[in-house]
Amino acid sequence: MDELKPAIVLVEPQLGENVGSAARAMLNCGLTDLRLVSPRDGWPNPRAQAMASGAREVIDGARVFETLTEAVADLQWIIATTGRRRDMVKDELTPVAAANEIRTRCAAGERCGLLFGRERIGLTNEEVVMSDAILQVPLNPAFRSLNLGQAVLLVVYEWFRAGDQTPARQQLDDGHPRATTGEVMAYLDHLEEALDASGYFKAEEMRPSSLQVIRNIFTRAELTDREVRTLHGIVTALVGRRRDQL
Amino acid sequence: MDELKPAIVLVEPQLGENVGSAARAMLNCGLTDLRLVSPRDGWPNPRAQAMASGAREVIDGARVFETLTEAVADLQWIIATTGRRRDMVKDELTPVAAANEIRTRCAAGERCGLLFGRERIGLTNEEVVMSDAILQVPLNPAFRSLNLGQAVLLVVYEWFRAGDQTPARQQLDDGHPRATTGEVMAYLDHLEEALDASGYFKAEEMRPSSLQVIRNIFTRAELTDREVRTLHGIVTALVGRRRDQL
């Protein structure tokens, strides 16, 4: 059986562009189950198709329902995205908490859905009451306005991220192995020798601290062996040029 | 001194709409320092202003530079957003790791910037090399296409979220206190009594397990005292109706 993934339910979306942009965001995050409740401009919608571009499979596979009850009839846990506080007793989750909740429930075999309301007025209280929980995206309280496509993007991205294995930080390489400490030290000796010959160390008593600064620059750079060869080449070239000038 | 926040640098953006949508995303997340490097259609741009709508303060405050070097001259740590792997030795961070890194650096007084490239071709290798690190948004490998406004939204949202104190899960209330265990038990006794009188428990040996199921439904519901009163009312009404029917 395929891994269960949440359905995205758009309730009475008004603009086809937003449906298309929601479809793109879904496919960006590996989701394909799009359900539409009474889209205002009917279905199929050429504007939704145009905006979806590369995500046509999501648009073409979208299912249309007359009521929200029909759209979520087969689901077992649904969460309603809202932009404002409701006066009701219900768990309210951040996108990250909702993502983790859905991952856990899907892994246990539950069919889940994320509900998004109309562009202007969102979901009605009746629709929110139907839901098992509420999702609200924390944003700058002074400017919370988010369009439908953006709201879907943020929410499905957090779902994707909750299952994503990309290391938080990785060092890209140039195909060459990290230099050994011996290679780095050999370069630093080469540099020190060249600096000695050039009269860089004007005062002998400053020499230890100057060397410490120089050595630190290169040891913390986590050089590859190719980069160390490049640095050797630079010193050799500069020394050569100085000799030519003499 | 105000808390330091990262600058958003858009390099040669082509569509004013995308600049406007980036400005909205920035203000959604409390950011206002927008810098533009040679926007294709000049500046100011009416399309950017129209798309920014409520975020006009960000658009109107945007600064325009001829080169990236000028745009980032005062910054101390910059990270380049890229959509594809580069053949260079550089740390690559996810949006979350980048957000945490920027939060830490800003808290230590460093001025940071997030770089975003042109719609079609992104940042050049030269521009990426200028940066201290690389940011790549993990997405569905089969459909990674994200427009400029959406890329900015995801990245700045993760920055916002990294500093946001909203509890992952909180229970909304209806202004009434959570019911005490005693109140819930009194309701369950009321219900049990009514069920007894109605002949609900057909077989006495099933009574303990039935009661356990019923009691569990209501004890895990974390009721408020108002809800408990509502439930009492329901039982009373149903009992009354049944009596009327006899």
Image (tube, coloured by chain):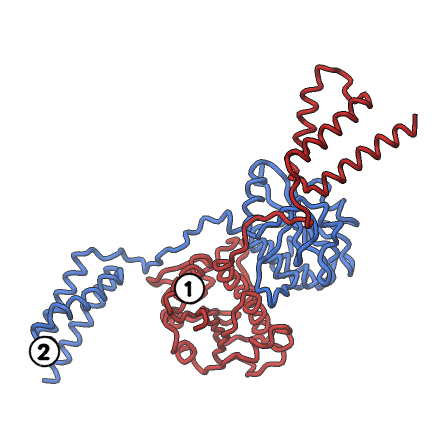
Chain colours: A blue, B red
User: x and y percent of residue A228 in the render?
Assistant: 22, 63
Task: Locate residue B234 relative to residue B30 in the image: left or right.
Answer: right
The three-letter amino acid code for the residue at tag 2 is: Lys
Q: Furthest-bottom residue in view?
A: A245
Residue pictured at 51% horizontal, 64% vertical: B156
Task: Locate residue B134 relative to residue B20 in the image: left or right.
Answer: left
Write down the residue under mark 2.
A202
Residue pictured at 75% horizontal, 48% vertical: A68
Q: Nearer the viewer, residue B184 or A221?
A: B184
Where's the C terminus of chain B, which quadrant?
A: top right
Quadrant in which residue B200 is drawn: top right
In the rendered image, the vertical position of residue A133 relative to residue A239, given as above or below:
above
Write down the residue under mark 1.
B102
Q: Which chain does the residue under circle 2 lie in?
A: A
The three-letter amino acid code for the residue at tag 1 is: Ile
SS assignment at label 1 = helix
Task: Locate residue B50 relative to residue B119 in the image: left or right.
Answer: right
Quadrant in which residue B234 is drawn: top right
User: x and y percent of residue B92 in the render?
Assistant: 39, 59
The residues tagged by marks 1 and 2 sit, at their Cα atoms, a distance apart of 40 Å
Q: Nearer the viewer, residue B170 or B152?
A: B170
Where's the N terminus of chain B, which quadrant?
A: bottom left
Q: Residues within 10 Å of mark 1 (few under 14, many from 20)?
A: many
User: Residue B128's mark?
Assistant: none
User: Can residue A34 be seen from the camera position used here?
Assistant: no
User: x and y percent of residue A126 in the render?
Assistant: 76, 49
Count the numbered circles shown.
Answer: 2
Residue pictured at 48% horizontal, 74% vertical: B11
Q: Which chain does the residue under circle 1 lie in?
A: B
SS assignment at label 2 = loop
